[in-house]
Amino acid sequence: MATCAGVLAISGQAAIADDDTDATVIDGIEVSVPGVETSADLEAFILSDESKTVTSNPSNGEIISVETGQSLVSPLTTSSNVCKTGNMCLFGTGVPNANYGFTGAGTMRGNWPARTKYTSGSWTAKVRFANGIVSPEVGPNSTNLFDRVTDVIAVSLR
């Protein structure tokens, strides 16, 4: 899938998903968000500060699904958890891969192995995976679930 403004292609195509949910498919992305019917609607929602969960594929950076609200997946917290309210939080698989909180506009490079997701907190956020692919940028109050455990080498906030 091509990206537009760092999020997704704008073609306006939508179709009802094959399962029994209220999901719609827009440009190959399963969308469970009332009122989001076009690619432009979806891009605006992803970058908005509304609470949402975005699932993405670290192998290619493509968005797989988008739904309202935070993920039902419980955060994997350890005693070294440094995520605070409003921080972007990068979640690991557990000991020894602790969660890390980030704040402040800009990009921090490093090596955070075995990551499962991030929450954007009060930031617009994206990450770069070890394979060089960049995740979709999501607005504040969002969760980006990875469809597999992956390593992250950079975090960008604005």
Image: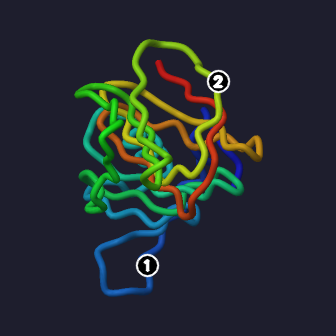
Residue depicted at 61% across the width and 53% down the height: 150
- Separation of residues labelled 2 and 1 (CA atoms): 38 Å
Q: Position of residue 129 (x, y in %)?
A: 67, 43
Question: Residue 140, relative to residue 94: is it above or below?
Answer: above
Query: Looking at the picture, how far across and down is residue 137, in whole percent?
Result: 52, 36
Residue 109 is labelled as 2
Please report whichever mark, 2 or 1, sits nearer to the chain's N-terminal start.
Answer: 1
Coloration of the structure image? rainbow
Quick check: 31 above or below 97?
below
Q: For the point 64% across and 54% down, which residue is it?
A: 58
**Residue closer to the observer: 144 or 18:** 144
Residue situated furthest right in the rendering: 131
Q: Which mark is residue 71?
A: none
Who is closer to the viewer here, 103 or 10?
103
Mark number, residue 17: 1
- The residue carrying pointer 2 sits among few (fewer than 14), some (14 to 19) or many (20 or more) residues within 10 Å by Cα, namely few
Q: Residue at x 46, y 62 (%)?
A: 65
